[in-house]
Image (cartoon, rainbow, N blue to C red):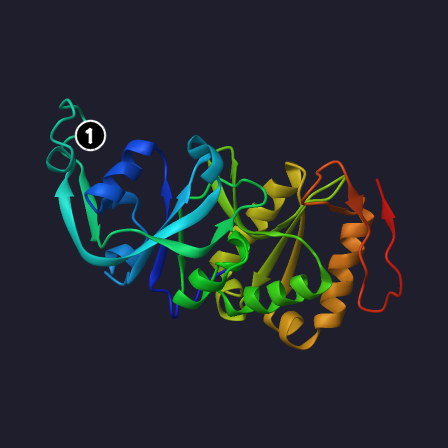
Amino acid sequence: MKKNKKNNNVLIALMPNKSDFEIAKTLYWYRIPVRSAPQIVKNNLIKYIAFYHTKVFEREKFSIRYYTEVNKISIVKRKNLLPDQPFDLKSENDYYKIEFSPLSALPQPIVSLRHRRLLFIPTSEEKLFNAKEINYLFNDSPLEEILWKEFIRKRITAERQLYIPIKNNKYFLDFAVFCKTRNINIECDGDKYHTQKVNVQSDKRRNNLLESYGWAVLRFTTFDIKYEMNSTLNIISNSINKHGGLQDIKNFENYKYILGPNDTQLLLFE
């Protein structure tokens, strides 16, 4: 859905390898290609940058542990950023050079329970310093935030803004819910954006393609989320149970049925 980027002054950025982390620790900068930089970088709105470590970091893999305050953002040629590297086709490419203070450790690591590969997450200071895991960081959509809080209350585990490549298309799912027989994509449709004709057509194509690759798709409007939450949660709960129950985040072999708003018992099975 169309995003509202208020209060985002923190960038979570991928730390892909140990050599780049050494540069961050000792030289205090990080680079992002200009062509793929998020808007928060282009608009020079970053106060803090934090780093998500990939699997090469072993004990620190799939977690955010370090952050720092940004001092300066400039555009620099790759050949000037990395003068010791051999000249190649990338050497003339432009990069944002983000310069910052020495790294500090977060009070508690922010982990990815599903070991996701992330690129960038714009977020707020409050979420950076209080997030329990990766999915608590997302801060782009008020509607998603309302539904996410209900998911927490109902113990519905979901991945927010999960990247799904299908053929030549790149999709970010508002919520991905993993079930035994079929996974579910849940979308929050802001009224203004999703009622425009071109976006309605795009959504239909997207739904059809996701369905053809095995995803069930549920879409909810502003009204559904703000004023009909019980009904919305019932639809989601029934869909999860219909598709074999919710996958256990700690043991992917186990699944559980979940409570609807009016249910009185929880059914478990393996």
User: Does 248 appear above or below 104?
Assistant: above
User: Does 150 appear above or below 105?
Assistant: below
Determine which quarter of the picture holds residue 33: top left
As helix, strand or loop, the secondary structure at mark 1 comes to: loop
Determine which quarter of the picture holds residue 4: bottom left
Relative to residue 75, is residue 35 drawn left or right? right
User: Does 135 appear above or below 21?
Assistant: below
Kindly identify which residue carries mark 1: 90
Residue 140 visible in the shown view:
no
Amino acid type assigned to the residue bearing label 1 in the image: Lys
Q: For the C terminus, which image quadrant?
A: top right
Relative to residue 35, is residue 244 drawn left or right? right
Tell me what residue is drawn at x 22 percent, y 42 percent.
26
Relative to residue 132, is residue 83 drawn left or right? left
**Viewer-proximal residue, 253 or 197?**
253
Relative to residue 265, is residue 132 drawn left or right? left
Residue 203 x/y as whole percent: 55, 53
Residue 175 x/y as whole percent: 59, 53
